Amino acid sequence: MVLLVALGLNLKATHIVGGELYYEYLGNNNYRVTLDYFIDCVNGNPGAIKPDLDGSNFAVFNGSTNQRISSFDRTIAAGLPKRVSETNYKCIITKPNACVDRYQFSFVLNMPPIKGGYIIAFQRCCRNNSITNLLNPDLTGSTFWTKIEDLRTQNWKNSSAHFKELPPNFLCTNAPLVFDHSAVDPDGDSLVYELFHPFNSYQGNSGARPGSPKPTGAGFLPPPFPQVNWANGYSASKQIDATNNFILNPTTGLLNFTPTQTGQFVVGILVKEYRNGVLVGTTRRDFQFNVSDCTFEVVSSFLAPVKSCAFTVSFNNNSSGTSGLSYAWDFGEKDDISDQSNQTFPTYTYSKSGTYEIQLIAKTSQCADTYTRIVRIVDPVYPQLGPDDTLCSPFTHVLDANINTEAITWNTGEIGSRITVNKEGLYIATYQKEGCAYKDSVYLTEDLDFPELPLDTIFCHNDPFIYTIDAGARFKKFKWNTNEVTQTIATSTPGLHYVDVTTSNGCVYRDSMYINQQLPPALNLRDTLVCPGFPGRFDAGSDEVIYTWSTGETNATISPMAAGSYWVTIFDGRCYNYDTATLENVDVGPYGLPNDTAFCNKVFMVLNPGSQFARYQWNTGESTPTITVQDRGSYSVILTSKEGCIVSDSMRIGLNPLPTINLGPDTTVCQAINPVLDPGQGIAYLWQDESSERTLTAYESGIYHVMLTDHNGCINGDTIEIFKDPNALPSDLFMPNAFSPNGDGLNDVYPNNQYQDIGVEYNLKIFTRWGEKLEDFNSPNYSWDGIYKGEPMAEGVYIYLVNWIGCDNKRRQKTGNVTLLK
């Protein structure tokens, strides 16, 4: 059976601190439903508190279909409040300004058993906007609900558990909280405690509030109810900043933690009731814890493990006070009056396993504070694998943890008290008990100190032999098949020999070897003489053995071409034999034609391949030892030695033309001219003055000669005579005093100099009468057309200045006027 209660929503419920909804079975299907409703009596909005207390709306839903059962809707007024008093701290000097009142809404409903039961809930908007662990807290509402389970058995008649104590109205940072948050159950059911994710009264984060405050309205959200959204860093498992996450004992319901951060934290704590192993009910308390910085005279606090896997436990004292502190510890071992200490950081060893309540009293001269924690001491049980051991190879060994249980895990992945192993290595057995892991390990070493006699041996001869066999000095005992008990034996008998040795670990191992004696396989290679260019042949015998030649071949015979020494190794499976032979070529003496060559201009050559041969056959048809050739082409000869060996050779003769060279005819030039002589393209040059450059400048009169080599190596030469005459051309220039650039073909340019080769230097400048330069020529080949910057110049007088070197190699200058006529 499920009941839902909803409050009026016309005002923001910034006064809500928390709530707890539970029920009591009265008989005849009657249930008393009670809501413990916690409000902020300091900061709460009176305008929001009064409507809640005057009448709050309750509704019921079918637990199977989640459908509203409107006939069960109720509007209930609250009873008188009960003030939540601060009882969880001592020796506090300055208390936070915190006030919480508890109001109760109570009513009776008759609800017959139905499939799925009933859901009872209470919805209200909104929570405080200053809550630390919620996202958008001012847009987050509250839903307090419970469920009457659908059991329809004797468990149907159930009264839900409810928490015994009112929660503290404030918490202090860095001061431990020990609060009994346990519940009572009228039916004596088994109780289990845990944290839960509190519930919202909105659809997601849309800000849509539940609707009409009346039960008949559409404002109630049906189950499943939305849950609050945690702020960053918080979750259902971490709902408040504390020194440890394990803040709630699931068996006792004890809240035991130390807050570390100021703020307001919504925390959900529920209790489940089980009857004969079946869940019959759940009660949830959704409460806002206010955490502040407090001032204490003294705070008793320490850290200790919730569970210790060893008898010895160390306690970390983090008590604080305004003046010098003294400590009184009681480690909870009631049968031992010595379980006390006044040390600051004590360590205590318990005599046996069990659950102990440790108490620390920290006090000053003015006040004393007490803090307690529960420590569970687990009785350690360690596997007993024994010492490390060395085993003879091969081995099969049983490892026994000596704990009669299957709760043993091995590092091999096996489970059980015993395992069988056959390899050396580290073996670890782990016994899991009450969440503690107890381990033992053993290292097994396999004795691999085997004797190593020499490999089987064969003597490839029939001579007597004595062979010494050494079993190794590291062993303790020796026993040979010859009954000798020494480290070494000397034998002259072929056959099987073995020894039994005893290692330092007492292991007995055997090794053996076989000694045989036989003749090596027969082998006889013969030296061979062949004509040049023909292969030899070496035969090592039959194909019944394995052959390895120096050439890499593995056949019985080989036919090498190159002269030299050859060896072969043969193996019949037991013995080797080895032999060498030499391949020689008949010495026909030195022979051969010259390398290919080429002549320049004409061919003439005598070919002589060697005079020691008995017969000569040329491709020209001649049969003489030598021939004379005067034409280009290919020539070859076949030679037969006196031993009948035939060799041959050939060559090619080419013919290249002489390179073309022309320095020109003998010539006469002005004394000012230095002709550059160029014989043409070649790869090497040699002038009469030993110069090797391609060109030569003729500075003086005389005869010049050059030899030119082309890319074929052919050489040709040429000679020229140069005469230098200072009167070869006039050295003076004629400069006209007028010109008419009118396009009639007469005197159109100035100076139109007819003496184009008068020297190596020439410069003409033309100016206006005011000194503006109009032209600047460096060759007598150029003349002025009367144009300046694209425009014809006006009629008038212009000034010229000319400098030149005449044919006689003398420098001259002339200046004057020239008239431009139209």
Image: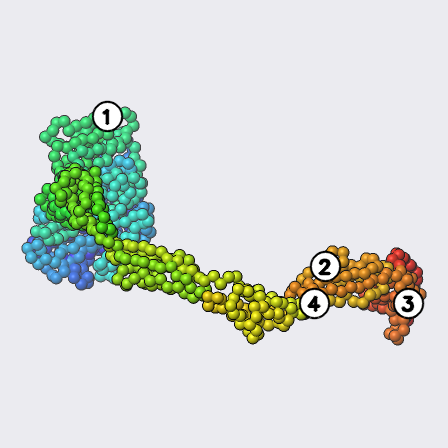
Tell me if mark 1 has few (under 14), some (14-19) or many (20+) residues whose alpha carbon lies within 10 angstroms of its own. Answer: some
Q: CA distance from mark 3 to mark 1?
A: 131 Å
Say which label, 1 or 2, has the lower sequence index. Answer: 1
Say which label, 3 or 1, has the lower sequence index. Answer: 1
Q: CA distance from mark 4 to mark 3?
A: 57 Å
Residue 686 image label: 2
Say which label, 4 or 3, has the lower sequence index. Answer: 4
Nearer to us of marks 1 and 2 is 2
Say which label, 3 or 2, has the lower sequence index. Answer: 2
Residue 820 image label: 3
Nearer to us of marks 4 and 3 is 4
Tell me if mark 2 has few (under 14), some (14-19) or many (20+) residues whose alpha carbon lies within 10 angstroms of its own. Answer: some
Query: Depth check: 448 or 261 in front?
Result: 448
In the rendered image, residue 600, in percent from the top left (x then y), is placed at 66, 67
C-beta proximity under 8 Å, tags 1 and 2: no
Residue on which the image places disc 1: 326
Q: CA distance from mark 1 to mark 2?
A: 119 Å
> What amino acid type is highlighted by mark number 4?
Pro
Residue 13 image label: none
Residue on which the image places disc 4: 659
Based on the displayed image, in which of its 4 quarters is residue 657 positioned?
bottom right
Instruction: Name the residue located 91 percent from the left edge and 59 percent from the top edge.
Output: 815
> What amino acid type is highlighted by mark number 3?
Leu
Query: Depth check: 590 or 716 in front?
Result: 590
Query: Depth check: 608 or 809 in front?
Result: 608
Q: Which element type, helix, strand or loop, lies under badge 2?
A: strand
> What amino acid type is highlighted by mark number 2?
Leu
Is residue 782 visible in the rendered image? The answer is no
Q: CA distance from mark 2 to mark 4?
A: 14 Å
Nearer to us of marks 3 and 2 is 2
Q: CA distance from mark 1 to mark 4?
A: 124 Å
Nearer to us of marks 3 and 1 is 3
